[in-house]
Image (cartoon, rainbow, N blue to C red):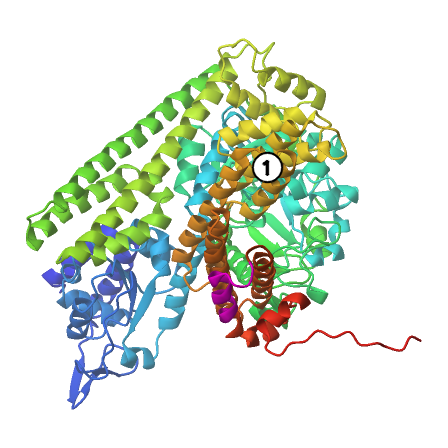
């Protein structure tokens, strides 16, 4: 008979982990039916208790204080083994103030059932601490668990985790390790799926706005769903094993659905194999530069009947310049994609994993394929450390995978037996494939690993590619229609009605973010109440609880803002919890600072979202309302001459307004051609760079202005114009752009060159000073994130030296530079040698100007003499004329030598 405590626990569990609640109820019902709900026998010893009857083997539980470790203080705590009810209660009560989520790992179901029958577990913790239970490594249960524990805090909270281990229970056996590793692995996978930072996510939002016309007005993937039911498909990736079997694709293009990753597109076309579909997933400019720019130019005709399926976070040039039909989609499972692409713009989202091969596999399943082959999917290093097949962008130029040191490579089972070496990222890709396979099989889809090499992907059927073709492809009749043709024939909807729907949804989305801003205003007021003078700690705590409820309301009201901000919100929320007692001035100051940072960061994210949603609204309205006879707006590629004509008109400062916003028009044109490769006047490229800068797209702007500068090489240009374009380049280089740090060193080179053309230009001096200050601030901020990084410490202190030198404080700069060389001589010897050499050359020049008797020079020379060993160790060349100043007894002699 179930107790009332059991009923209360199970009711609460159903709200949080309904799948687990059903699982435990079934187990409990089975035990009750068999009258087998186990009791337990507890035997006391001087140091603890032996517990028998609830687990396969008896386990020992220490008494309180016997070998007890310090209370955990991390944000996320794994309790490995719930033990007896008394142990569990004491463990949870002892958790530190900074704990935000507790995950109880208990594969011994009988033990967990006994706990839930005796203790109402949800009353043991304050309401702000999330409690969840893990009983096995079932992926759906693990995902449910993370959704109720780590999810509300932001997946990044799980990066700060700690374990409390019931030693006796874990020693007695059980699947603790498997459950823990599965949960931890899923956390890491979720982190990878999100992106590396909030900047990653904001960049994705910006790209979604830029490609919004293609999402709204282009073909939809839903029109192709099931169009190739029960056909076979192959996902072609670029691993080194691809060279073994890719030529088997030839002659089967009319029977086998060929889906290529972007990396392998050139190789296939070069060898006369035209894929039906090519996919792109990543958001960086490098994807277009490496895999599309030249391929689209060289194979324009061949690509006219190849379907491009591209993620909405990719740079707009990929979809804009593609000659054939194209579909822009989002990633299912990511709140931002589901909200912007699906809800606001009416597009489609599919599960896309973390690699383009995952996306291709899901796409094949969406189209209806029942048998999917993987080729070139090594996910391991090939012979001689190869990472990619021949004739791909990364064959000669090392990718990030190739740069992974051998000691950081991971040995894993090979698909053909034995072991192979992979890396952390590839291993994550393998695990994601393995998690995809059960749901594919449930849908009647079989995944075949026909790579004929590489790492083992558990759950796939390992088959030579020729056997797969003989069994699943050769007996089939040719396609009635290709994917590109099916996309072209897809039902077209009325442009105006599509735009009206999207514009209405975008307005609703903007309204949601405006409401979020009003909640942030309210939080600001609540924060001021908490920090008002004259309150007792208890009064502050009560008011702080009200402030926390505003944060909860904010995140509940806008899940997208919560998702955008989870990287920074986690750190600030953790600090808020650590300081929630508000017991003294220091904790109150830290609490206030954490709220200030949270409010400021959320404001930035909300305003950024509003800005780019307004941009998308403007772009879609312009697409519909612009006079198409005169407007360049469109979805198809533009010829270079036609694009140039439009841009020269749009960039003309003296033109009359057409009533249509120019920014989306300009962006649409430059997305549908390739100005970097075009033979255009440098002034047009220069203006485009400044246009991109005005939108915060400095990284792209740098590429345009760099091309303009290349065109000016060996040309006669007026000095003022040369200085101006170099100053603009320096400013673009120094501008932060979401995922790109300011390129301050290159910006200084640009300013140095500008100074040659305009030595009296005061703006250059001012920009140099600002750059030095910016460099100091940038590396100070980075040092807070990575305080032990020697290179960042060096850059921060070097910026300080340069700042002093630029202000004329030469001796202060000199002394700090010498201290740097001393402090970093062990960790950064090359940099220290260069800095010491600068010190010697500078003091030598100062002696020639001021003379040896200057007190400041004498003091610095004394400092040098105290550490001459460092000069020897770093092998610093000492100018001969200067050596006598620092080496006692030094005499310069010239001795005759016999000439041969």
Of 425 and 4, the residue lying toward us: 425
- Mark 1: give few (<14), some (14-19) or many (20+) Cα within 10 Å: many
- Considering the image in quadrants, where does the C terminus appear? bottom right
- Magenta: main secondary structure equals helix
The local secondary structure at tag 1 comes to helix
The answer to whether residue 261 shows anywhere in this view is no
Q: Is residue 164 visible?
A: yes
Q: Is residue 202 magenta?
A: no
- Would you name the residue on which mark 1 appears? 702
> What residue is shown at x 41% (from left), y 61% (from top)?
787
Residue span colored magenta: 851-863
Q: State the image coordinates of residue 880 (x, y, percent, origin top left).
A: 68, 68
Quadrant containing the N terminus is bottom left
Is 857 covered by the magenta stretch?
A: yes
The image shows residue 607 at horizontal and vertical percentages of 36, 33
Residue 610 vertical position relative to residue 44 in the rendered view, above or below: above
Left/right placement of residue 847 relative to residue 250 reads left
């Amino acid at each position: 008979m179930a107790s009332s405590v059991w009923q209360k626990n199970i009711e609460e569990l159903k709200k949080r982990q309904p799948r687990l609640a059903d699982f435990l109820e079934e187990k409990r019902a089975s035990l009750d039916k068999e009258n087998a709900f186990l009791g337990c026998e507890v035997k006391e010893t001087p140091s603890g208790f032996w517990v028998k009857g609830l687990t396969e083997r008896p386990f020992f539980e220490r008494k309180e204080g016997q070998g007890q470790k310090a209370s955990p203080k991390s944000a996320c705590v794994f309790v490995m083994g719930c033990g007896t009810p008394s142990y569990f209660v004491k463990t949870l009560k002892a958790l530190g103030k900074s704990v935000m989520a507790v995950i109880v790992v208990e594969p011994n179901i009988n033990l967990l059932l006994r706990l839930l029958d005796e203790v109402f577990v949800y009353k043991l913790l304050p309401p702000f601490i999330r409690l969840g239970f893990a009983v096995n490594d079932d992926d759906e249960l693990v995902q449910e668990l993370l959704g109720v524990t780590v999810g509300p805090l932001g997946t990044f909270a799980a990066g700060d985790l700690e374990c409390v281990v019931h030693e006796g229970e874990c020693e007695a056996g059980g699947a603790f390790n498997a459950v823990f590793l599965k949960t931890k692995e899923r956390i890491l996978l979720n982190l990878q799926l999100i992106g590396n930072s909030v900047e990653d996510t904001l960049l994705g939002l910006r790209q979604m706005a830029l490609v919004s016309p293609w999402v709204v007005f282009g073909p939809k993937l839903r029109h192709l769903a099931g169009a190739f039911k029960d056909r076979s498909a192959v996902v072609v990736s670029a691993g080194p094993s691809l060279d073994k079997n890719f030529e088997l694709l030839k002659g089967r293009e009319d029977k086998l659905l060929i889906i290529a990753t972007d990396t392998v597109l050139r190789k296939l076309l070069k060898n006369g194999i035209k894929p039906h579909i090519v996919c792109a997933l990543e958001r960086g400019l490098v994807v277009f530069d490496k895999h599309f720019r030249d391929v689209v130019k060289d194979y324009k005709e061949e690509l006219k009947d190849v379907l491009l399926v591209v993620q909405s976070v990719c740079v707009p040039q990929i979809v804009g310049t593609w000659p054939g039909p194209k579909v822009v989609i989002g990633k299912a499972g990511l709140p931002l994609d589901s909200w912007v692409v699906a809800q606001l713009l009416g597009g489609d989202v599919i599960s896309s994993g973390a690699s383009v091969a995952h996306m291709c596999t899901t796409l094949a399943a969406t189209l209806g394929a029942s048998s999917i082959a993987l080729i070139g999917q090594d996910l391991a290093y090939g012979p001689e450390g190869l990472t990619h097949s021949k004739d791909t962008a990364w064959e000669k130029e090392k990718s990030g995978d190739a740069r992974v040191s051998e000691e950081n490579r991971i040995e894993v089972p090979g698909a053909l037996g034995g072991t192979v070496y992979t890396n952390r990222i590839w291993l994550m890709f393998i695990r994601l494939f393995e998690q995809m396979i059960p749901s594919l099989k449930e849908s009647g889809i079989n995944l075949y690993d026909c790579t004929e090499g590489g790492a083992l992907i558990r759950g796939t059927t390992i088959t030579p590619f020729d056997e797969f073709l003989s069994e699943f492809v050769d007996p089939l009749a040719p396609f009635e229609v290709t994917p590109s043709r099916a996309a072209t024939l897809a039902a077209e909807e009325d442009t105006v009605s599509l735009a009206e729907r999207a514009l209405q949804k975008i307005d609703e989305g903007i309204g949601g973010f405006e409401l979020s801003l009003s909640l942030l205003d309210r939080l600001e007021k609540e924060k001021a109440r908490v920090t008002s003078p004259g309150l007792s700690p208890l009064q502050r705590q009560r008011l702080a609880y009200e402030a926390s409820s505003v944060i909860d309301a904010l995140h509940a009201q806008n899940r997208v803002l919560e998702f955008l901000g989870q990287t920074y919100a986690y750190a600030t929320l953790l600090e808020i919890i650590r300081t929630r007692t508000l017991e003294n001035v220091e904790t109150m100051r830290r609490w206030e600072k954490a709220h200030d940072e949270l409010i400021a960061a959320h404001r930035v994210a909300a305003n950024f979202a509003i800005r780019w949603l307004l941009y998308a609204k403007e772009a879609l309205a312009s697409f519909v309302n612009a006079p198409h006879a005169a407007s360049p707006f469109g979805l198809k590629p533009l010829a270079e001459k036609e694009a140039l004509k439009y841009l020269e008109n749009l960039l003309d400062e003296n033109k009359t307004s057409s009533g249509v916003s120019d920014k989306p028009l300009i962006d649409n044109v430059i997305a549908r051609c390739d100005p970097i490769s075009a033979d255009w006047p440098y002034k047009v490229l220069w203006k485009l760079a400044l246009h991109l800068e005005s939108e915060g797209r400095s990284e792209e702007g740098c590429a345009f202005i760099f091309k303009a500068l290349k065109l000016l090489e060996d040309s006669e240009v007026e000095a003022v114009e040369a200085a101006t374009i170099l100053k603009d380049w320096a400013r673009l280089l120094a501008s932060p752009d979401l995922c790109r740090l300011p390129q301050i060193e290159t910006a200084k080179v640009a300013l140095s060159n500008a100074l040659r053309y305009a030595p009296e230009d005061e703006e250059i001096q001012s920009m140099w000073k600002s750059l030095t200050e910016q460099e100091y601030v940038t590396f100070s901020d980075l040092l807070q994130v990575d305080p032990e990084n020697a290179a960042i410490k060096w850059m921060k202190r070097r910026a300080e030296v340069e700042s002093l030198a630029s202000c004329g404080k030469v001796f202060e700069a000199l002394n700090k530079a010498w201290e740097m060389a001393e402090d970093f001589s062990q960790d950064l010897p090359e940099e220290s040698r260069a800095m010491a050499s600068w010190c010697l050359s500078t003091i030598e020049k100062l002696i020639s100007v001021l003379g040896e008797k200057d007190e400041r020079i004498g003091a610095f020379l004394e400092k040098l003499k105290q550490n001459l060993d460092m000069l020897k160790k770093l092998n610093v060349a000492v100018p001969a004329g200067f050596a006598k100043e620092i080496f006692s007894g030094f005499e310069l002699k010239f001795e005759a030598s016999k000439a041969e």
